[in-house]
Image (cartoon, rainbow, N blue to C red):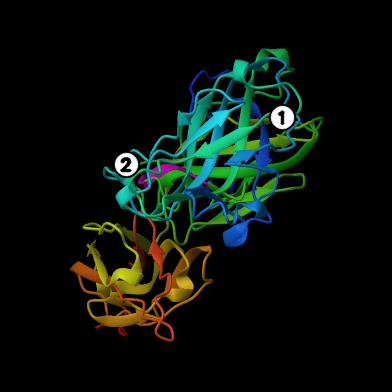
Amino acid sequence: MIKISRSLISVLILIAFSSAMAQPLPGDLYKEYLWHNASGDCYGALRVGGSLDYQLIEKADNYQGDGMISPPFLVDLEHAIKAELVVEKMLCHEGTEGLRVSINGKEPVRLPEPAHIPKPQSSYAHHFNTIVPVEVADLKQGTGNTFQFEVDTAGHWWPQNLVYGMILRVYYDPSTLEERGIVQAVEGGVLGLENRIKVGIPADQKVEKVDLVGFYDGADLEGDGLYRQWHYSYHKCQIYNHIGTITKAPYTLNWNTEWIPDQKEKVRLAAFVHQTDGYIYMTEPVSNLELKRPGISVELCKPYQRPKGWFTRKGEFSERFQIKGNLDKAVEAKMVSRTWSPGYFNGIYINDFLVFTKEGPKYDYFEHHIPLEELHSLQEGENILKTGKTPMYSGVMVHGVEVQWPGIMLLIKYNTQQTNPLIH
């Protein structure tokens, strides 16, 4: 039997067919074919837009013109049962709609918008991995597959989305392959502050790496408007914001949960096992894990009244968040968000206290984990967070910062055993 404790969690594996679409689920077996625009504009993005766009597009890798990409995929369709295209999309020009893709000259398919962002989603800067189903019959075995992107161009001064990468994911019938192990039901267990996690993989398996993921309530760094979900994302086709990647047997890692928010519901853990023959499968999850950290509490303050068009070149913008904890016991806090071109920040203010000036690049994506050096800017109840207007540089208007959905989140860590005498 699997023993679940604060020090060790083991996951054993079973291949089981899942017919659901939209992202890998426990038991799925698949391969991934990756493309990103390594030499493209904006530090590796493909611009998809109107006429102003394509004067720069020749920088794109495997680009054939007019939004057409022909990546050097060697697609394996033997025993394929379904497929999907994962597109890392960033809405960077407000009001741009209709991002769609034509695969091998077929009728263009519109990529889904994030369902948990208010409509119209084009009013909000956002950056997430959208997934569109692909008919297996529309794909070609081996090379020669093409992908053509376009957006609506009518009535917009410069319609544009950025595509930072795409993953063609082809699923296979697991019954065609040998079972890779067994799964044992887990009815409970405890996660603490420090956890040693082991993914139990049979010794005869040839494994390249294992990506460990968790299902819990946490900061929305996927940008899809969900806080409770399997937490991981892709940037330029590389997984990140997951628990961690393991590349060597015995496939163990340490997970520190010091910034995971307190959980009302149980946590689940699973793994993506990448085999050396290119197949990937998602393990059955270890479920019903309770998060217990004596003396420590973490609060996630989720923004609301988040403005449309949060582009700092246009002016000041503000959001609000609630603090429910006792700030006398707060010991640390940090702001978590995703932006584009944060080198043009002109300050973040909480309740009119300047708490941050700027960090990060210009004209590129960035993820922020900004510690609050002083906690006196915070107050119990409602708080107002504001960004300053990006000024002109030498009299010239510059790009400014795009604060992406859901806005700027705040994590607060409390010492629940004693009052902190430094906080008043």
**Mark 1 secondary-structure assignment:** loop
What is the three-letter code of the residue carrying label 2? His
Q: Position of residue 317 (x, y in %)?
A: 26, 68
Q: What's drawn in magenta, residue-wise?
A: 225-232
Q: Look at the picture and state if 55 lies above or below 382.
A: above
Quarter of the image with the C terminus is bottom left
Q: Position of residue 87 (x, y in %)?
A: 53, 40
Residue at x 50%, y 44% (from the top left corner): 214
Labelled disc at residue 279 = 1
Labelled disc at residue 116 = 2
User: Which class describes the residues within 10 Å of circle 2: few (<14), some (14-19), or many (20+)?
Assistant: few
In the drawing, does residue 50 fall left or right of residue 354?
A: right
First along the sequence among labels 2 and 1:
2
Q: Nearer the viewer, residue 352 or 322?
A: 352
Labelled disc at residue 45 = none
**Quadrant position of residue 412:** bottom left
Q: Are marks 2 and 1 in contact (CB under 8 Å)?
A: no
